[in-house]
Image: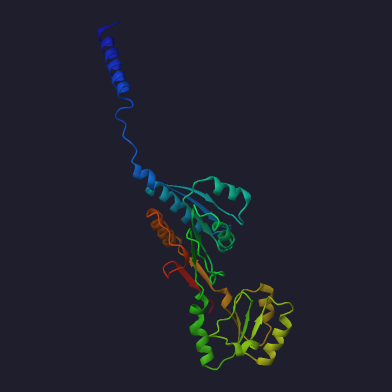
Amino acid sequence: MSTRRWTRWLMLTVTLTLLLSGCGKNIPAIDPALLQNKLSVLLISKPNLPDTVKTVFSQTLLSWRDNEKISYEWLPDVAALQEQHVNKIQSTAYDYIIVVGNELTAQIQPYASQIPDKKWILLDDAVSVNASQTMNDKQIAWKQTGSDFMQQQWDQWVKQEQGMGKTLEWVTTNDRPIPSAWAPSEEAEYISYADAQGWYTPFQNQVKQHGPNWIVVYSPLEASVLQRMKNLPAPIMNMASTSVNVNWSVVLAGVLDQMKKHQLTPGLQNYTLQEIQVNKPQ
């Protein structure tokens, strides 16, 4: 063996010996604070979300993973909680479970009440129907438009019309009562309930009898019913078509802030004007 090859072999041997002798001695310990701060999130979202919303969710989750070291899973297009979803939630140590979509939040809330070891954040994406209920679970935060949302949005218009002496004929359902400030009990004959059997014919007769200036729809109706109403001798103000667009970037930034602090503000919470954009018929 030549002197040069011998020298290389000797240097390699010494290097390997030093490396092997150092194994297990000077390995830096994992910071306990880093382990404690490691978070895991499950996002469950409803079907038929706009592509723009899906993009926001995807980019946000990736940012949480890359910048905040938050591990995540996303179950998209969930129409209803199934057994496989329940098993996944029970078998995985998620810290936070985020649920998006009015139908899903209403369905999952009773289930979330039975699992106190996980923090649940329920996010409505439309005008909330269950806003008047109470909720005392300390592990659940439910973001909604609020119990008085519709009254806030339409109070000025109703008072303006009534102030000019105009008559309003109301259509709603039993689960969405007309605010008493708009239709006191003594004006009950001006309210029709679309979830009552055979309601339309009496309503039609009332419209002809009362001669209202407006037919005001407060609860969503089928398109075919709305079309029939157009044949009645009064214009329609479809309050029920009021909608909201959620500013998901702002909402999820607030969610991240709570997660980084390992906190949760439980209970029903109203979206702020920075978190939603309101769309009303004219």
**36 or 152, nearer to the observer:** 36
State how the image is colored: rainbow
For residue 209, above or below residue 25: below
How many numbered marks have been drawn onto this rendered protein structure? Answer: 0
Q: Which image quadrant is residue 242 in? A: bottom right
For residue 254, above or below residue 197: above
Q: Where's the N terminus, which quadrant?
A: top left
**254 or 276, nearer to the observer:** 254
Visible residue check, residue 157:
yes
The residue under the point 65% across, 74% down is 221
Q: Position of residue 49 (x, y in %)?
A: 55, 59
**162 or 132, nearer to the observer:** 132
Q: Position of residue 261 (x, y in %)?
A: 37, 55
The residue under the point 38% across, 53% down is 260
Visible residue check, residue 213:
no
Q: Residue most toward the top?
A: 1
For residue 25, above or below residue 243: above
Q: Position of residue 39 (x, y in %)?
A: 42, 48
Q: Position of residue 97 (x, y in %)?
A: 50, 54
Q: Is residue 223 left or right of residue 1?
A: right
Q: Residue most toward the bottom?
A: 165
For residue 42, above or below residue 208: above
The residue under the point 69% across, 79% down is 228
Q: Is residue 87 left or right of residue 53?
A: right
The residue under the point 28% across, 10% down is 5
